[in-house]
Amino acid sequence: MRHCYATHLLDSGVNLRYIQIYLGHSTILSTLVYLHLTAAGNSDAYGIIDNLMDRF
């Protein structure tokens, strides 16, 4: 359940630091255990990177 919650928060654009706080972790490394990359998040990342590259 925590894995799904953390992954959905990340896919929704919630900052990684806030996810850490919501899960009650003292270190970001603990939070990273609960995160899984998804196809939707991957597509979003490519879009953001493409937009940044277009600026330069």
Image (tube, rainbow, N blue to C red):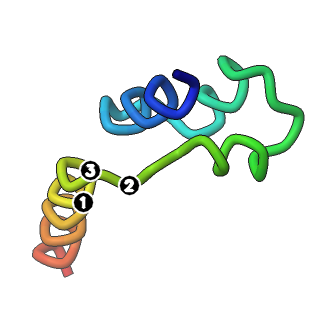
Residue that badge 2 annotates: 37
Quarter of the image for residue 21 reads top right
Q: Which mark is residue 13?
A: none
Choose between 54 and 7: the one closer to the eye: 7
Type of residue at label 1?
A: Asn
Disc 1 and disc 3 in contact, CB within 8 angstroms: yes
Neighbour tally class for label 2: few under 14, some 14-19, many 20 plus, Cα within 10 Å = few
Say which quadrant the C terminus sits in: bottom left
Disc 1 and disc 2 in contact, CB within 8 angstroms: yes
Residue that badge 1 annotates: 42
Type of residue at label 2?
A: Leu
Secondary structure found at label 1? helix
How far is mark 1 from mark 3, CA to CA?
Answer: 4 Å
Q: Position of residue 32 (x, y in %)?
A: 64, 50
Type of residue at label 3?
A: Gly
Determine whether, in the image, residue 36 is placed left or right of residue 55. Answer: right
The structure residue drawn at horizontal position 43% and vertical position 36%, both measured from the top left corner, is 7
Above or below 2: residue 38: below
The structure residue drawn at horizontal position 42% and vertical position 27%, both measured from the top left corner, is 9
Above or below 48: residue 20: above
Above or below 45: residue 14: above
Disc 2 and disc 3 in contact, CB within 8 angstroms: yes
